[in-house]
Image (tube, grey):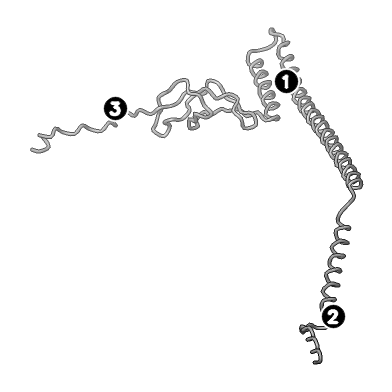
Amino acid sequence: MGKKPKPEPAVEDVAPGAEGLDNIEAEDAARAATASGAAVLEPVEQAVVRLERELADWKDRALRAAAEFENFRKRAARERDEMWNRGQVEVIGGILEVVDDLARVAHLDPAQTTAGALHEGMGLVERKFLKVLEGVGLERVDPAGQPFDPHSHEAVTTMPAASAEADHTVGAVFQAGYRFRGALLRPARVAVLQWTGPAGDAPAAEPPAEEAAS
């Protein structure tokens, strides 16, 4: 008997060259990933040198900024002191003029000076002195006839008011107060008027209940 031929192995339906294409694509992807990683990664020595250079640059910037700030602080303090000194010079100059006026009044010959002339001279000196102080921000608080204000006035006594309209107003100023640039330095010491009303203004007493009922 003759030998039967061996059966051919079954062949799957696969497109020609499909496995080869898959391998090529995988190899290309691997090579691309390797190339990308090589571009991102940096040798340690180069990274250290670069970071040290950047650190030195930032240190230099910080030192320059600190030096500039220190120079600015010193310059601002110097300008503030110069402005303060100029202001003081102006105030002292004005006060010296008042001192000169006081000296002239103090050295007047009593035999040739009347009390009226002396009084008038002292008044002029006072007004001039207050004008100098007002020029630097001083404000005189003289509230005669004004409503009493406990924030600016200090009541030392009371006085009877002549009318109800004058109640709780300042009747007399014993000592003027002062403000400096809006801040109260000293309250004005005053007498406050109080209206009590005449006795005839008191309401009449109501009659007893028995009389009212009758």
Image quarter of residue 86: top right
Mark closest to the chain's N terminus, 2 or 3: 2
Callout 2 amino acid: Gly
Rendered residue at 91%/47% (across/down): 46
Give the structural element (helix, strand or loop) at label 3. helix
The kind of secondary structure element at disc 1 is helix
Viewer-closest of 133 and 154: 154
- Is the residue marked by circle 1 packed among few (<14), some (14-19), or many (20+) residues within 10 Å? many
The residue under the point 81% across, 89% down is 3
Disc nearest the viewer among 1 and 2: 2
Q: Distance between the Cα atoms at labels 2 and 3?
A: 130 Å
Mark 1 vs 2, N-terminal side: 2
Give the labeled residue for mark 3. Answer: 199
Q: Disc 3 to disc 1, how far (Cα)?
A: 54 Å
Q: Residue furthest bottom?
A: 1
User: Of 27 and 39, which appears nearest the observer?
Assistant: 27
Q: Amino acid at mark 3?
A: Ala
Which residue is label 1 attached to?
Answer: 98
The C terminus - image quarter: top left
Q: Nearer the viewer, residue 3 or 66?
A: 3
Bin the neighbour count of mark 2 within 10 Å (Cα to Cα): few under 14, some 14-19, many 20 and up: few
Farthest top residue in view: 111
- Residue at figure coordinates x 84%, y 39% from the top left: 62
Choose mark 2 or mark 3, whichever is in front: 2
Residue marked by disc 2: 17
Q: Mark 2 near mark 3, Cβ–Cβ under 8 Å?
A: no
Mark sitting on residue 182: none
On screen, 16 above or below 85? below
